[in-house]
């Protein structure tokens, strides 16, 4: 199908491309700065745009990887990201489906009940005591269970599901199935774009999480997540400064900032690998809309 | 008529309410089953701990049992009321920064997602979309470092460049002056979250049935007409929902973000409500006070949420509740 | 097309399912595994988990160090250190609230100590004291203050880092090349320093690499920055003790607390910085500079002087040397306000008898308190403390004529203390010993020398000063890096002033917090006033704002609490 391009269209395309290039530079530059800074000698970075590393050194990365807990915490973070987002999809996905049904008994109540939880907080201590009573503190499950229901994702999925023509599910129900099978066989696959999006969000939240480790698992080193390890390592590095103490040699090549940069690079790389994979699911619109009315 | 709605109106005598209720329950048992896990988890993990709000009405000291403190009624709340004259600027800062952030973020993400879709070179669009996401990973502490490195009034790289080129006489004191706080926070918020928000819109766009575009083509619609009449209307519900949801957070801020950027020179415009709760509540280990302020903040936020929800529902028939 | 989609989808789902299963299996095993939350007793070793602030020197277990190994062999106890990078006070508080605290627990500041005591979570130590003669003797002056924490006057906690006979000074760092150019004539008063810096800036408008210099800088963005060290000129005289960064100062002559913000010497501090600003000598970025930034600038010689933060000098000078700017190295020099010197005030040096920030106690979860108290008794003795601060005889020091002499290994540790401490467990210079919770102090042993040999001025300088610094001090005519303070300082005991505090959750506590808020917020405005008149105007505006608070009640309450302390302890 040939597309007719008007002058306006061509102009638009040029401007659009230009805009994207500018955005690319603006967004890429800080990230590039993080990379070059992690490879530079700290004392030489002040006042520089750091378009390339100054005083190239791998010392920050070396320090990062020499941190004992890095590898085990990477594993923990991967585990919780996978398990957590899969669990979230299961629990919240089903909830979103149910809540999208206008004929649901006490539908209004349930919708409010679940979604309102985004807007209040019972307080650190009451929540801690609740988790403690349930036996979640100092275990791996404190990472998973509280994050199975994510109201924000439920709203996104619910919104998407509401735009699906009901004829799709009816086909299943007429055949003698129930809503459960309708969901897994028909709705879930159709929701691929939004599912991919919420899986991404959930996995990222798990990957980035710091507070839950700090609050509930700080006494269990074998359960530390990568962000927590990084946070601790950077603070330890900073404490060297405050004490006026230092270790000969590597002090000048690493400081808390360059270490932070190195860790940031390390934690983004896995995401850079996973993200493109997920991306193709929420941009492929060709699969959708296969209902023959 | 669909099967589902026919089920709803199928005839059953309305005289015995309980049996009708039971029938409805029975008919929806799979739905309720599917909702069970989420419902139970929410009830136990979010609502049960709310009994802890009792702290706001007591004289709780750390070390007491949760219900051990003496009852003091509304004393914590009246404490807050006496501060309310001081809270004026805090609330103003919070509302300005958050309000503008919400509106600008949603608008920019919406426009950007459409533009991305229109980009001719698809691999390029995918690349931009991926890169757009990266600022989300840059923690606020690092964000501060970068802003400092570029815009410190004397040592900042860009300030130095501009001064040496003669464009300005003295560097912009972006970090050390009250003039720039709001703009800075809004721009940085935009920077951090655009990729995230774009994904939401892009997911929606990808869900628009191709037939809509195809039939529009057959009707002779051009490229821009398609955007205006098909893409945008499909995105408005999403944008509305994002607006409603974010309105409930209009009094909340990311503490890490404001911790690093607030300092002695810009507090008038940079300090937000959550910083106050942290400084005068949690840092003082005064949980009752922090809880009381939190409760008030929640109540007001929910009112805002309900109002916005109703308004948006009236205007565009989309709502979250 | 649909068929194809189902295939891909099917494959993806199968893949995901496998991953999820694998993850949940391994997660299950982790979930069941002993979380290690309880200290155990394996093969006779009593392991105690201790929560410590994040620090590079901490080993995972104390037995990994030489001293820790000795403790293990002698007492059968091993400490497991768990580092924590968040706010320690909040954590300690949460641990109490959730009944999830350790066996040996740190408590920062009095309000937390009192919370633990009032909740009945700390073990009373009095019954054990008769078996702890060294501890009782060592802390004979301090124990009465520790008893003040509980209503029943019993002993529940001990404190680290006291008693201390070593001088801990933070005045001014100045670039030594500037002193050389001034023929080693050292300014002392604030007026003299302004003249000195003005001339120095004229002679050195930029560094060699072309960066503009600044007269003075400091890390104002740190929590102790604008709030703590900007106004601290008041401590350089002989009247006011630096007690806290809060709402009060302590007048040692009248033995009364006074308001911080209204203190005239605090005003002088603001005036000093304002003058620096008006003369273009103040680094405008100081308000937004973190410690890292200050160090980086200093490592390139940008600031001609640095306010207060002498604890960074070692790292700064090392950076200068590696940047080829060895002659610029900073040395610590004194500063007093003009009026203090005119009044002939000596420089007061604080001696603490109480340090609630570093409180430790044994909780009711402690399985073998006697064992741990044995170790604390050992640490309080000469033998134990010498090992903790000077190491092992033969390896780290030799004994000649009854005096300990450090070996090269120990002297080297002066410039490499973190790595040294991590390996040996010996804390040579700072007070952040990795043997968390064990008494650590800076006093003299029976042989007349400090327990930590590197605290002896002659060894300290030898071990920690660079050649350039030694050269500078020689030219200044100082015998040691602390000579001036030893000659011109007077040791004043803080007494019970550090033991007085207002409950932060009370109304007065809130007022006190607001007093600090107002002070901090107006500080920058005062310093950045463009003229003397404007300064006075801003100052009176600030005072007007400040007077809206009931600050006098806070001070009165502090004095009342102080008067309730037995006379002999004040």
Image (tube, coloured by chain):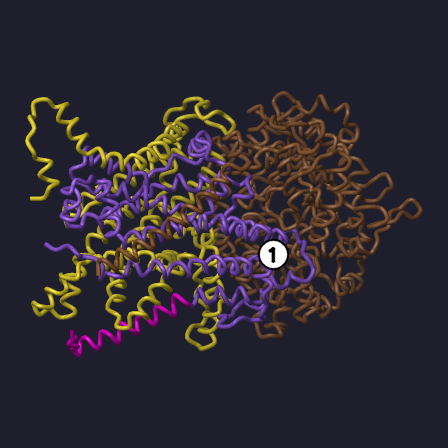
Q: Residue B1's quadrant in the figure?
A: top left
Say if the magenta span includes residue A143.
Answer: no
Residue C492 in the figure: left or right of residue B232: right
Task: Provide the letter of the chain coloured brown.
Answer: C
Label 1 chain ID = A
Image location (x, y in percent) of residue B152: 48, 64
Callout 1 secondary element = helix
> Which residue is rendered at x = 76% and y = 29% of the image?
C136
Image location (x, y in percent) of residue C312: 65, 56
Residue C320 in the figure: left or right of residue C558: right
Query: What is chain A's hue in the picture?
Result: purple
Depth check: give the residue in front, C317 or C43.
C43
The answer to whether residue B117 is above or below residue B14 is below
- Image quarter hosting the C terminus of chain C: top right
Evaluate whether residue B105 shows in this view.
no
Q: Residue furthest right?
A: C401
- Image quarter hosting the N terminus of chain C: bottom left
* Part of the protein shown in magenta: A1-28
Residue C568 in the figure: left or right of residue B312: right
Q: Residue C198's quadrant in the figure?
A: bottom right
> Which residue is rendered at x = 11% and y = 41% of the image?
B3
- Number of other residues with Cα within 10 Å of mark 1, as a class: few under 14, some 14 to 19, many 20 or more: few
Depth check: give the residue in front, B90 or C549.
B90
The answer to whether residue C363 is above or below residue C258 is above
Image location (x, y in percent) of residue A93: 29, 44
Residue C264 in the figure: left or right of residue A3: right
Q: Which residue is mark 1?
A: A66
Depth check: give the residue in front, A205 or C152.
A205
Image location (x, y in percent) of residue C484: 76, 54
Say if the magenta span includes residue A20.
Answer: yes
Task: Provide the letter of the chain coloured yellow.
Answer: B
Evaluate whether residue A259 shows in this view.
yes
């Amino acid at each position: 199908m040939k597309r007719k391009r008007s002058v306006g269209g061509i102009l638009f395309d040029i401007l659009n491309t230009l805009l994207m290039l500018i955005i690319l530079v603006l967004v890429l530059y800080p990230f590039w700065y993080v990379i070059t800074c992690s490879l530079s000698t700290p004392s030489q970075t002040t006042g520089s745009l750091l378009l390339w590393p100054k005083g190239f050194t791998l010392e920050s990365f070396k320090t990062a990887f020499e941190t004992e807990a890095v590898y085990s915490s990477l594993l923990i973070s991967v585990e919780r990201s996978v398990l957590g987002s899969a669990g979230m999809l299961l629990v919240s996905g089903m909830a979103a489906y149910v809540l999208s049904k206008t004929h649901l008994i006490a539908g209004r109540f349930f919708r409010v009940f679940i979604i309102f939880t985004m807007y209040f907080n019972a307080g650190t201590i009451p929540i801690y005591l609740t988790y403690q009573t349930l036996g979640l503190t100092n275990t791996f499950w404190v990472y998973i269970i509280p994050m199975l229901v994510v109201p924000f994702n439920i709203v996104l999925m619910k919104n998407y599901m509401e735009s699906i023509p009901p004829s799709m599910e009816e086909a299943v129900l007429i055949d003698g199935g129930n809503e459960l099978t309708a969901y897994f066989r028909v709705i879930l696959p159709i929701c691929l774009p939004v599912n991919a999006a919420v899986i991404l969000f959930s996995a990222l939240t798990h990957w980035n999480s710091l507070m839950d480790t700090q609050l509930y698992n700080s006494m269990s080193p074998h359960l530390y997540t990568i962000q927590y390890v990084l946070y601790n390592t950077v603070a330890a590095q900073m404490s060297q400064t405050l004490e006026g103490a230092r270790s000969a040699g590597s002090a000048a090549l690493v400081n808390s900032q360059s270490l932070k940069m190195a860790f940031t690079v390390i934690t983004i790389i896995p995401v850079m690998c996973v993200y493109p994979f997920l991306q193709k699911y929420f941009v492929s619109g060709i699969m959708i809309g296969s209902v023959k009315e | 008529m669909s099967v589902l709605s026919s089920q709803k109106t199928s005839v059953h005598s309305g005289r015995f309410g309980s049996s009708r209720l039971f029938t409805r329950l029975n008919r929806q048992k799979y739905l309720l089953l599917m909702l069970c896990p989420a419902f139970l988890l929410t009830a136990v993990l979010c609502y049960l701990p709310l009994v802890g709000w009792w702290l706001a009405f007591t004289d709780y000291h750390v070390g007491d049992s949760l219900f051990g403190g003496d009852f003091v009624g509304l004393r914590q709340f009246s404490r807050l009321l006496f501060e309310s004259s001081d809270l004026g600027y805090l609330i103003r800062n919070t509302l300005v920064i958050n309000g503008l952030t919400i509106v600008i973020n949603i608008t920019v993400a919406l426009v950007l997602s459409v533009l991305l879709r229109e980009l001719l070179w698809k691999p390029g669009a995918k690349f931009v979309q991926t890169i757009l996401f990266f600022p989300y990973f840059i923690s606020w502490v690092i964000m501060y470092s970068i802003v400092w490195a570029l815009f410190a009034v004397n040592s900042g790289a860009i300030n130095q460049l501009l001064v040496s080129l003669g464009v300005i006489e003295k560097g912009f004191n972006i970090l050390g002056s009250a003039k720039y706080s709001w703009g800075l926070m809004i721009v940085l918020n935009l920077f951090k979250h655009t990729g995230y928000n774009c994904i939401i819109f892009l997911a929606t766009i990808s869900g628009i049935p191709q037939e809509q575009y195809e039939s529009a083509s057959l009707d002779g619609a051009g490229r821009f007409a398609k955007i205006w009449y098909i893409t945008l209307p499909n995105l408005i519900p999403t944008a509305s929902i994002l607006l409603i949801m974010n309105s409930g957070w209009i009094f909340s801020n990311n503490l890490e973000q404001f911790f690093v950027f607030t300092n002695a020179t810009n507090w008038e415009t940079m300090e937000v409500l959550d910083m106050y709760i942290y400084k005068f509540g949690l840092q003082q280990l005064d949980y009752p006070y922090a809880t009381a302020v939190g409760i008030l903040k929640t109540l007001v936020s929910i009112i805002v949420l309900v109002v916005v929800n109703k308004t948006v529902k009236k205007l565009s028939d989309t709502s979250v509740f | 097309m649909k068929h194809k989609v189902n295939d891909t989808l099917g494959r993806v789902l199968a893949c995901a399912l496998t991953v999820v299963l694998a993850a949940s299996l391994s997660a299950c095993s982790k979930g069941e595994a002993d979380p290690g939350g309880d200290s155990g007793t394996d093969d006779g070793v009593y392991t105690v988990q201790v929560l410590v602030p994040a620090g590079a020197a901490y080993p995972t277990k104390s037995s990994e160090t030489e001293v820790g190994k000795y403790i293990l062999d002698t007492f059968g106890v091993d400490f497991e250190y768990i580092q924590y990078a968040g706010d320690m006070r909040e954590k300690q508080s949460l641990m109490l609230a959730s009944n999830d605290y350790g066996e040996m627990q740190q408590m920062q500041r009095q309000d937390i100590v009192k919370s633990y005591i009032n909740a009945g979570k700390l073990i009373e130590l009095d019954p054990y004291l008769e078996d702890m003669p060294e501890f009782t003797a060592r802390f004979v002056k301090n124990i009465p203050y520790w008893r003040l924490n509980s209503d029943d006057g019993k002993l529940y906690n001990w404190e680290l880092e006291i008693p201390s006979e070593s001088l801990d000074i933070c005045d001014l760092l100045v670039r030594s090349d500037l002193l050389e150019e001034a023929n080693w004539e050292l300014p002392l008063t604030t007026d003299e320093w302004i003249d000195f810096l003005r001339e120095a800036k004229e002679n050195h408008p930029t560094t060699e690499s072309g960066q503009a210099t600044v007269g003075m800088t400091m890390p104002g963005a740190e929590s102790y920055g604008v709030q703590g060290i900007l106004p601290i000129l008041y401590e350089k005289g002989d009247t006011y003790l630096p007690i806290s960064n809060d709402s009060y100062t302590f007048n040692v002559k009248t033995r009364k607390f006074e308001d911080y913000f209204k203190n005239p010497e605090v005003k002088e501090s603001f005036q000093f910085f304002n003058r620096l600003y008006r003369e273009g000598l103040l680094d405008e970025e100081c308000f937004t500079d973190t410690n890292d930034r200050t160090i980086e600038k200093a490592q390139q010689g940008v600031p001609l002087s640095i306010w207060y933060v002498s604890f960074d000098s070692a790292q700064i000078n090392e950076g200068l040397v590696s940047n080829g700017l060895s002659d610029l190295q900073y040395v610590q020099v004194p500063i007093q306000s003009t009026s203090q010197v005119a009044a002939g005030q000596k420089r007061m040096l604080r001696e603490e008898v109480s340090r609630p920030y570093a409180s430790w106690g044994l909780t009711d979860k402690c399985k073998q308190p006697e064992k741990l108290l044995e170790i604390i008794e050992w640490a309080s003795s000469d033998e134990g403390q010498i090992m903790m601060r000077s190491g092992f005889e033969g390896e780290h020091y030799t004994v000649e004529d009854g005096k300990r002499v450090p070996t090269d290994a120990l002297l080297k540790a002066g410039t490499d203390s973190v790595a040294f401490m991590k390996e040996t467990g010996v804390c040579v210079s700072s007070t952040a010993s990795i043997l968390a919770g064990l008494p650590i102090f800076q006093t003299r042993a029976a042989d007349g020398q400090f327990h930590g040999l590197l605290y002896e001025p002659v060894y300290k300088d030898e071990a920690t000063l660079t050649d350039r610094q030694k050269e500078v001090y020689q030219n200044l005519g100082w015998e040691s890096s602390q000579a001036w303070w030893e000659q011109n300082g007077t040791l004043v005991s803080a007494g019970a002033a550090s033991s007085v505090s207002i409950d932060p959750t009370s109304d007065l506590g809130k007022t006190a917090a607001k007093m600090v808020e107002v002070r901090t917020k107006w500080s920058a405005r005062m310093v950045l006033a463009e003229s003397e008149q404007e300064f006075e105007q801003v100052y009176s505006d600030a005072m007007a704002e400040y007077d809206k608070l009931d600050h006098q009640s806070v001070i009165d309450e502090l004095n009342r609490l102080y008067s309730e302390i037995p006379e002999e302890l004040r």
